[in-house]
Amino acid sequence: MSLDPANNPYPRFISGGWLSQGIIPGRPLDVLAWGLGRTCFSPTITPWLSDGGTIELNDSFDVPEILRIQPVKQLIINPGGEGKVPGIWAGGVQISLSL
């Protein structure tokens, strides 16, 4: 990677988000979060690509105390950076078991 945009394929990237824990009374370990990210491609290296981004929403909660489930939903904006594909939705689930 390089700080020079002529050598760096992703000269600008920004992301941020918000996380809240214990928003449901009696469930202090549950977490609700959302995040945003945006990537800009180098106009020198990849002039045919335009900016892309992601919006994510996820939640994590314990079913019993040893099992944590974290579903995630993402909206991927301009996947591939070519502007040929509309935004797509992606989802998943992470399951953790603590013994």
Image: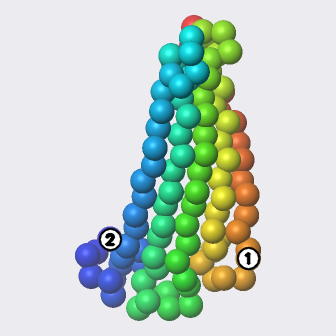
Q: Residue at x 41, y 91 (%)?
A: 44
Label 1 crowd (10 A; few <14 / some 14-19 / many >=20): few
Find residue 63 and report its horizontal and vertical position in percent: 68, 15
* Residue 42 occupies quadrant: bottom left
In this picture, residue 3 sits left or right of residue 87: left
Vertical arrangement, residue 22 with respect to residue 77, above or below? above
In this picture, residue 4 sits left or right of residue 23: left
The amino acid pointed to by label 2 is Met
Vertical arrangement, residue 54 with respect to residue 39, above or below? above
The first of marks 2 and 1 along the sequence is 2
Q: Quadrant of the C terminus?
A: top right
The amino acid pointed to by label 1 is Val
Q: Residue at x 73, y 76 (%)?
A: 85
- Say which mark, if any, is on residue 10: none
Q: Residue at x 47, y 38 (%)?
A: 19
Tag 1 residue? 85
Viewer-side label of 2, 1: 1
Q: Quadrant of the N terminus?
A: bottom left
* Residue 65 occupies quadrant: top right
Q: Secondary structure at mark 1?
A: loop
Q: CA distance from mark 2 to mark 1?
A: 27 Å
Q: Secondary structure at mark 2?
A: loop
Find residue 78 and report its horizontal and vertical position in percent: 64, 73
Task: State the residue in front, 61 or 47.
Answer: 61
Looking at the image, which residue sits at the far left? Answer: 3
Find residue 70 and report its horizontal and vertical position in percent: 63, 31
Label 2 crowd (10 A; few <14 / some 14-19 / many >=20): few
- Say which mark, if any, is on residue 1: 2
Vertical arrangement, residue 70 with respect to residue 36, above or below? above
Q: Is residue 38 visible?
A: yes
Find residue 21 and report its horizontal and vertical position in percent: 48, 27
Q: Residue at x 62, y 17 (%)?
A: 62
